[in-house]
Amino acid sequence: MWNATGAPDDRFAQSRFTFTRTGARQRPAAQRAGGGRATGILPRVAQRRRSERRVATVGSGLAELVPDPDRRSGWTLLLDGTPQSHVDLADPTHLEFEYVRRIGAALDLLAPAGQPLRVLHLGGGALTLPRYVAATRPGSAQRVVEIDGPLVDLVRTWLPWPPSARIRVRVGDARAELAGMRPGGYDVVVLDVFAGSRTPAHLASVEFAREIARVLAPTGFLVANVADGPPLRHARAQVATVREVLPQACVTADAAVLRGRRFGNLVLLAGRTPPPVPELARRAAGDWFPGRVETDLDRFAGGAAPVGDDAAVPSPAPPDGLFRSRA
């Protein structure tokens, strides 16, 4: 059941740095404030919006919708106390989290600007990326598969998307739903599935990658969020696994993550045709969170072998304390 609570929530108003459930960074509050706003009224606005926080129990734990004190129409979805999604209902083109911005850049570059795409999202959250595609590529046909039915109801009730967005949401397991989809039906598959803070093992195998490749058009791409930390064993194995069926690939991430120096998110872009590496590199270098693009994936994989169902394991859990706000 949903209930509103008036308890203040200062996690976002006071923190300089916030991590999502998989270690992706959220911008410091000073950068997140909207331009042209009178700073004298911000505390009053923030206090009023914090009183609008909503709390519910969903299939994956305790969900909270926390108003963004720096954006009047912004909301952060938390699951068990860690940020899972951020949406701005008035501006769905605003992407707050680091890895989501990298996925958004890839979606921008996979086809001419404004051209509709057929997009399958495996993992839904608050539907940040489906809303982004609907706004930037009007007319796109999109399907979202999300295993947590109560979470879908939560988002549909409190963070509704316009009917014109052409977003269809199906409740179910990503792999099970994928098996029933027709071949070649999608231009893009976005893979961002987590059970808590880990990707389930059955979504990390070459058999699963083959199912993704099957539903992609010949020129289609997989855009996958891979969470890992030193020494990047999981990420290297996932690169080898996906390239077994979608060999033209690159990885974009923060340089420290790519070098295995900290836990974070790597975005893997893979298909049967070359990805737009030069444009992606320019976007990564100029982002709020500067990153780089790795194209030498033979070197990056370091001899890792593709992983089958019999050997697949979940992605590693983030380090203890990663989700605490940094003062």
Image (cartoon, rainbow, N blue to C red):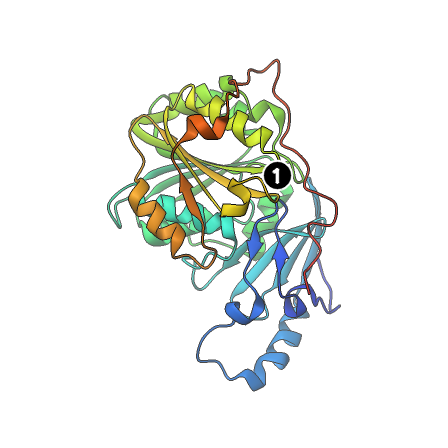
Residue toward you, 67 or 224: 224
Residue 67: image x %, image y %? 60, 65
Image spot of residue 9 (x, y percent): 71, 66
Note whether 326 is above or below 268 in the view shown.
below
**Residue at the image point whose x is 45% and y is 24% from the top:** 242
Is residue 77 found left or right of 162 in the rendered image? right
Question: Disc count in the image?
Answer: 1
- Residue labelled with disc 1: 229
The residue lying at 47 percent from left, 30 percent from top is: 300
Q: Is residue 71 visible?
A: no
Q: Is residue 148 visible?
A: yes
Residue, far top: 310
Outermost bottom residue: 40
Please tell me whether mark 1 sits on a helix, a strand or a loop: loop
Image quarter in which the C terminus is found: bottom right
Which residue is found at the position 34% from the left and 46% from the top? 280
x and y percent of residue 52 in the render? 65, 67
Q: Residues within 10 Å of mark 1 (few under 14, many from 20)?
A: many
Q: Measured from the top left, where is residue 61 in percent x and y?
A: 72, 44
Residue type of the residue flagged with mark 1? Gly
The residue at the point 67 percent across, 41 percent down is 318
Name the one closer to the observer, 85 or 257.
257
Residue 66 lies, with reference to residue 143, above or below; the image says below
